[in-house]
């Protein structure tokens, strides 16, 4: 699925993969995030950290009518307050998508897949 925008200059199509890559990049810039995790790959209680080119595996973009909902699967740093980190990620992702693509996001749902000790 993708988002279709009609402007004075022409027609613009934004794919869900682009949205998920931008959302993932915005999320990992937040304090307390170790990385993104795959939504389906959790084995033996260990979530694998995704590389930059695979952020779309850790972000699900859902469209229903005019609503745009995003589910994000993250790994947080040990010792941080998870609720504050999740709130910061929600705010950052909404702001970044609004500024870069001009999209209004209805909800950003955070799923914590693991807690890791951050390496310096």
Image: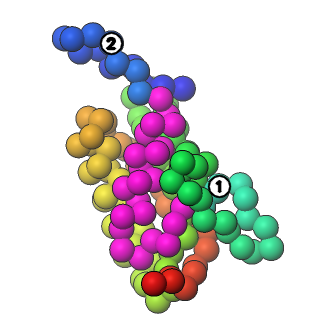
Q: Which residue is mark 1?
A: 39
Mark 2 secondary-structure assignment: strand
**Mark 1 packing: few (<14 Cα in 10 Å), some, or many (20+)?**
some
Q: Residue at x 27, y 40 (%)?
A: 100
Provide residue 49's location: percent of width, then percent of height: 60, 65
- The magenta span reads 15-36
Asked whether, in this view, residue 49 is left or right of residue 66, the answer is right
Q: Is residue 28 magenta?
A: yes
Q: Report whether residue 20 is seen.
A: yes
Q: Residue at x 36, y 74 (%)?
A: 31
Q: Is residue 109 magenta?
A: no
Look at the picture and state if 30 lies above or below 41: below
Look at the picture and state if 74 lies above or below 44: above
Q: Report whether residue 108 is seen.
A: no
Provide residue 110's location: percent of width, then percent of height: 49, 61
Labels 1 and 2: the sequence-earlier one: 2
Q: Split into 4 quadrants, where in the image is the N terminus?
A: top right
Q: Relative to the observer, which residue lies in front, 106 or 94?
A: 94
């Amino acid at each position: 699925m993708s988002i279709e925008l009609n402007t004075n200059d022409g027609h613009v199509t934004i794919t869900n993969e682009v949205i998920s890559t931008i959302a993932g990049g915005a999320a990992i810039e937040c304090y307390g995030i170790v990385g993104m995790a795959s939504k389906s790959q959790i084995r033996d209680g260990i979530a694998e950290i995704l590389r930059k080119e695979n952020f779309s595996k850790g972000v699900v973009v859902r469209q229903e009518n005019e609503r745009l909902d995003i589910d994000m699967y993250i790994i947080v740093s040990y010792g941080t307050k998870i609720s504050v980190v999740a709130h910061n990620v929600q705010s950052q992702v909404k702001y970044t998508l609004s500024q870069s693509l001009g999209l209004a996001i209805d909800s950003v749902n955070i799923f914590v897949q693991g807690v890791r000790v951050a390496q310096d």
